[in-house]
Image (cartoon, helix red, strand yellow):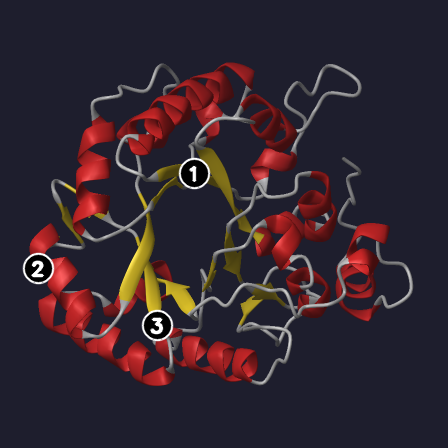
Amino acid sequence: MKNFALLGAVSLCTFFACQNTDKSAAAQNHESTSAMKNSEKGYQLYTVREALTGADSIVATLKATRAMGYEKVESFGYMDGGFLGLSTVAFNKAIADADLISPSGHYMPSELESTTMGTIDPHSINDFLDAAEALGQKWVIIPWMNDAWRNKEGYDHLIEYLIQLGEAAAKRDMVAGWHNHEFEFAPLEPSQPGSLSAYEYLLNALEGSNVVFEMDIHWVAFAGENPVEWMAHYPGRFPLWHVKDFAADTATQVPVGQGVLDWAAIFAMAETAGLEHYYIEQDFCAADKAVQCLQESIEWVNEQPFIN
């Protein structure tokens, strides 16, 4: 895949937002959005993590976001048999009481957080699947790995674990997945000219398995890559998206639609990508403004004819 190096804020603005005539052929072939599968508006709970400080605040925040028009959430924070300090049963009730659903969740093997790289114990697989099943989730997403794992051996351990997770998930009519950041777009073996990126390595190694990819569109673009080209090159592999935006300075995340990404071109690829669920997310908001950031994002999304 072609790598678009970050050449500064002006280059990114030109490439992602201001460019109208130099889109890839794949994007041109999919400009019609009439075939986009209807998808309820969702968000990743991590966006409002600072407001999720206890049972009452979790319930209040979920209900407030439902009132904005969000219909689904993607969970995070599973630990010790529960979510965000609540039991799985209580957390599921909070979601249901807010009239929300949760089709997918992020689940973190402890080994991937370690500064020591090694094998990943598959004992966590059934725990993750049990928790996800209790929430009615189909998609069980592994979201991150520490620096020590970001080499060929580490990715090989990850692939082995994801395949095991996918095989176990298939028995429950569920699906495993990987969520990217920017580091996957570095060369897998930097000392070897022409080395594949880690992202290509993962996509190729996991083809044909019960493992999909949740594309975090912001992090793809932040790495200097074109999300549209990845979707075109690997059709049907990205059924889940994180929809987040960033300002022209490239360092500041902003509500969706207030940044430089060309969302019309990206959502034109929904059918090609196999999109089933998208989640608005903003990793960093101004202090105490996370809920407001979600409000601003959904207001913009509601005005776009190309987003169902």
User: Splitting the image into 4 quarters, where does residue 262 fall?
Assistant: bottom right
Structural crowding at the residue carrying mark 3, measured as other residues with C-alpha within 10 Å and reported as few (<14), some (14–19) or many (≥20): some
Q: Which numbered dot is residue 147? A: none
Which residue is painted at 30% across and 78% down in the image? 66
Of callouts 3 and 2, the N-terminal one: 3
**SS at badge 1:** strand
| C-alpha distance separating marks 1 and 3 | 22 Å
Q: In the image, residue 284 lies at what x, y percent?
A: 45, 63
Of callouts 1 and 3, the N-terminal one: 3
Q: Is residue 128 above or below residue 41?
A: above
In the image, what residue type sits under mark 3? Glu
- The mark closer to the camera, 3 or 2, is 3
In the image, what residue type sits under mark 1? Gly
Q: Is residue 180 above or below residue 241?
A: above
Which residue is painted at 63% across and 80% down in the image? 305
Which residue is painted at 34% across and 76% down in the image? 288
Q: Nearer the viewer, residue 297 or 39?
A: 39
Q: Which residue is mark 3?
A: 71
**SS at badge 2:** helix
In the image, what residue type sits under mark 2? Ala
Q: In the image, residue 50 lies at what x, y percent?
A: 28, 66
Q: Nearer the viewer, residue 25 or 105?
A: 25
Report the number of discs. 3
> Which residue is farthest right?
21
| C-alpha distance separating marks 2 and 1 | 25 Å
Q: Which residue is mark 1?
A: 177
* Residue 141, visible in the rendered structure: yes
**SS at badge 3:** loop
Q: Which residue is mark 2?
A: 90
Residue 305 lies left or right of residue 243; in this view the side is right
